[in-house]
């Protein structure tokens, strides 16, 4: 069912693996030097545009191009997902037919997750999918709490459960944990979940048919915040997830970049092997693998329903640290793979989509400080105000549409959530602006910085609708 054509298997469709290695800028080695050069160029261009008479016209021209692309995204119609496989509980589904169903390996890297590991294992081992056609691997990354003890108590209960405990000296963080296990798995499709995941029972029946298309290298499930009712921070994260889900679908429908989000990601084994597994030299393995898959000629699809649940960060400080890590990893991939991006090794639609995404998410916040400073000095409006207005409009429309698409609720409720969600999203401006400056002056230590999971049960059923 998930066999790939000869042109894929022969490797002629792919960028050679050795060309996917991290590249330095000419004369600038290391990520810090590349980040410093990039920041200097962006700030220098911003100042120059303020000083030349036709600088505002260049910005207006860029705004027109981005607006055209934005309209195409908003008007796109995402393709429907293929029908799911039949439930194994239906009498007409005979066990003899299960041998033709793809074998799936589910992986979870866990470190000090005693509060959430038992319900996750129970859910993963009781999916509506033939037990003989999937396996569950839990990689215990040298946990020092009760995670190890709880896992040992579950081994005899679930025959498809496999447990690997890493030693104290094991390296690579989450990527290293996944790399240590996936070559020993048997799955044609490999799924990855965070330890706090809330997995729908029917998810594999919906995921597997999407891989029937040979060019599909990975699928990302919609993510929902299970403790969204906890406070304003978690409500903002739910709105943020809805915004992300909406633009994932819209961008993919235009042939743009689909992205992996770590929790609830599924990768075709052949695609993962071509990419060489997960990159252990990055702090966001999902975003790095996203680019490697696209450079390899694969497409990433998105599953809207069912959604995988996860805990939202409940405290501002924890949210700040998590978002900084996400922002740095997303920015880092542009620095790492600049040569392949510049050489247009992606399809044109993907290259343009990725460039537009970078301008709005990373470029605008990075130039905000010099743009505002020059505007004050010259007693004028910020030069990039037109693009900023476009970005805000996109965020408002996309978040509202995303909430309407992912949640069954009244229009006025979605409207209020959109207003708060966009106020909440303003923290990204500060995160990106400070991250780009910090990355330019301070080297990053690669280590597994995990988010604390509390095992919250609030609003689980509502958020997974």
Image (spheres, rainbow, N blue to C red):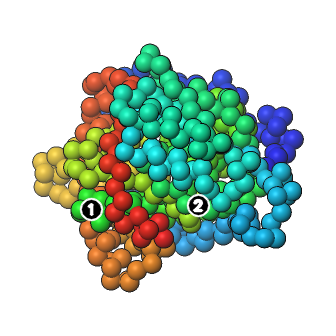
In the shown orientation, is residue 159 left or right of residue 445? right
In the displayed structure, does residue 261 sit left or right of residue 427? right
- Say whether residue 292 is left or right of residue 297: left
In the depicted structure, whether residue 24 falls above or below residue 235: above
Q: Secondary structure at mark 1?
A: loop
Which quadrant of the figure has residue 321?
A: top left
Image height check: is 70 above or below 49?
A: below
Q: Is residue 90 left or right of residue 123?
A: right
Residue for badge 2: 201
Residue 179 location in percent, x, y? 58, 28
What label does residue 346 carry, if any? Answer: none
Query: Dot 2: what SS?
Result: loop
Tell which circle, 1 or 2, labels the residue nearer the N-terminal end.
Answer: 2
Quarter-wise, where is residue 183 in the image? top right
Disc 1: which residue: 230
For image coordinates 27% across by 25% down, the residue present is 441
**In the foreground, 361 or 118:** 118
Whether residue 36 can be seen here = no
Residue 2 at x, y = what percent?
79, 49
Q: Can residue 246 be seen in this snapshot?
A: yes
Kindly identify the residue that appears in the image at 58 percent across and 26 percent down. 180
Query: Which residue occupies the foreground of this view, 51 or 309?
Result: 309
Q: Residues within 10 Å of mark 1 (few under 14, many from 20)?
A: some
Q: Could you classify mark 2 by the number of other residues whose Cα lies within 10 Å: few (under 14), some (14-19), or many (20 or more)? A: some
Whole-angstrom CA distance, mark 1 to mark 2, is: 25 Å
At a point 73% along the width and 59% down the height, the residue shown is 209
In this orientation, which residue lies closer to the viewer: 18 or 45? 18
Q: What's the residue at 80%, 40% (across, down)?
A: 8
């Amino acid at each position: 069912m998930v066999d790939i054509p000869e042109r894929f298997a022969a490797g002629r469709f792919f960028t050679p693996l050795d060309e996917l290695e991290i590249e330095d800028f000419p004369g600038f080695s290391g990520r810090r030097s590349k980040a410093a050069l990039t920041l200097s160029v962006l700030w220098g261009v911003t100042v120059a545009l303020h000083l030349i008479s036709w600088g505002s016209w260049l910005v207006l021209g860029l705004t027109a191009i981005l607006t055209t692309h934005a309209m195409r995204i908003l008007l796109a119609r995402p393709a429907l997902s293929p029908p799911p496989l039949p439930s194994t509980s239906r009498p007409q589904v005979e066990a003899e037919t299960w041998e033709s169903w793809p074998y799936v390996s589910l992986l979870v890297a866990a470190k000090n997750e005693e509060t959430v590991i038992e319900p996750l294992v129970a859910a993963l081992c009781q999916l509506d999918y033939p037990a003989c056609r999937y396996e569950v691997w839990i990689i215990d990354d040298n946990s020092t709490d009760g995670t190890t003890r709880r896992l040992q108590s579950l081994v005899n209960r679930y025959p498809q459960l496999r447990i690997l405990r890493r030693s104290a000296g094991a390296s690579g963080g989450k990527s290293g944990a996944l790399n240590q296990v996936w070559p020993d798995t048997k799955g044609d499709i490999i799924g990855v979940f965070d330890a706090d995941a809330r997995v729908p029972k029917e998810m594999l029946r919906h995921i597997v048919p999407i891989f029937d298309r040979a060019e599909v290298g990975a699928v990302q499930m919609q993510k929902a915040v299970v403790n969204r009712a906890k406070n304003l921070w978690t409500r903002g994260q739910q709105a943020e997830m809805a915004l992300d889900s909406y633009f994932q679908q819209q961008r993919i429908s235009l042939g743009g970049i689909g992205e992996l989000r770590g929790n609830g990601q599924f990768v075709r084994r052949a695609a993962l092997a071509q990419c060489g597994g997960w990159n252990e030299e990055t702090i966001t393995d999902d975003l790095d693998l996203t680019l490697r898959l696209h450079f390899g000629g694969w497409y990433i699809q998105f599953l809207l329903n069912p959604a995988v649940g996860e805990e939202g960060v409940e405290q501002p400080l924890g949210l700040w640290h998590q978002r900084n890590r996400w922002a740095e990893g997303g920015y880092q991939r542009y620095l790492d793979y600049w040569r392949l991006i510049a050489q247009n090794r992606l399809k044109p639609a993907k290259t343009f989509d990725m460039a537009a995404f970078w301008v709005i998410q990373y470029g605008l916040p990075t130039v905000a400080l010099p743009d505002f400073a020059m505007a004050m000095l010259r007693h004028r409006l910020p030069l990039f105000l037109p693009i900023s207005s476009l970005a805000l409009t996109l965020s408002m429309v996309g978040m509202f549409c995303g909430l309407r698409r992912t949640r069954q609720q009244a229009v006025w409720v979605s409207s209020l959530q959109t207003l708060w969600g966009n106020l909440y999203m303003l923290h990204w401006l500060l995160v990106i602006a400070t991250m780009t400056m910090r990355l330019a002056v301070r080297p990053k230590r690669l280590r597994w910085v995990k988010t604390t999971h509390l095992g919250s049960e609030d609003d689980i059923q509502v958020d997974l609708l």
